[in-house]
Image (cartoon, rainbow, N blue to C red):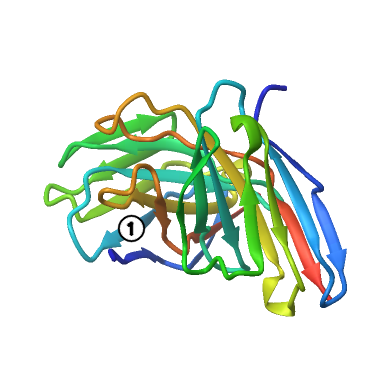
Amino acid sequence: TQLLEQSPQFLSIQEGENLTVYCNSSSVFSSLQWYRQEPGEGPVLLVTVVTGGEVKKLKRLTFQFGDARKDSSLHITAAQPGDTGLYLCALEETDSWGKLQFGAGTQVVVTP
Amino acid sequence: DTGVSQNPRHKITKRGQNVTFRCDPISEHNRLYWYRQTLGQGPEFLTYFQNEAQLEKSRLLSDRFSAERPKGSFSTLEIQRTEQGDSAMYLCASSFRPGRDIPDTQYFGPGTRLTVL
């Protein structure tokens, strides 16, 4: 079973600052997904990265997939209070047909 | 709204009681998943269905848990003789996956928060 570790566990920043959260796996994975979850709601898919070295941008969010396909990062530029939430990474287990394994998440709080 | 819906949103029960949750997936999604999430953790896989067939169950799913998806549409998750350790958010997700070589995109419902007193 692959292990997914996310860091940091908690991040509190002021509006306008930048932040980066990390996701690391104990072994190579074929694809990785990033979700954001707000209190009392289910996770919402932000992006899926598939190719080693891939960089995807979603407005102020930049997602990077490591060349070795064992790590990924999410960078938020000029964070806003609306970016507050639990950021989760997840990978699809090998030969599982869709079973996702999630990291524990990084709780991000952006204060005005 | 045509997203995944779950009912009830909250359930408070006493230890030993049975509870049942319902999930209505996005229509035409052939795959349906149940996950459990406790405070400070990411969701943990419980089970999934392709159409009406239950294809895999996690070892987290003890014999007190049962899930069904009659007719391949909505699904129910029942917990018998609830224990305090069952308190968690139960999440349902659905997807349509035409082939194994395409990453699965799962759409999550808002969850049912269970509190066992």
Residue B60, above or below A83: below
In the image: residue B57, left or right of residue A84: left
Number of labels in the image equals 1
Crowd rating for badge 1 (residues with CA inside 10 Å; few <14, some 14–19, many 20+): many
Question: Residue A110, how many percent across, how many down?
Answer: 59, 53
Q: Chain of mark 1?
A: A
Quadrant of image for the C terminus of chain B: bottom right
**Does residue A102 appear anywhere in the picture?**
yes
Question: Residue A17, how many percent across, how many down?
Answer: 47, 50
In the image: residue A79, left or right of residue B73: left
Mark 1 sits on what residue?
A23
Report the residue at 26% width, 48% height from top. A95
Quick one: A112 or B59, which is closer to the camera?
A: B59
Report the residue at 17% width, 55% height from top. A28
Q: Quadrant of residue B79?
A: bottom right
Mark 1 residue element = strand
**Does residue A111 appear anywhere in the picture?**
no
Residue type, numbered disc 1: Cys
Report the residue at 41% width, 50% height from top. A100
Quick one: A75 or A39, which is closer to the camera?
A: A39
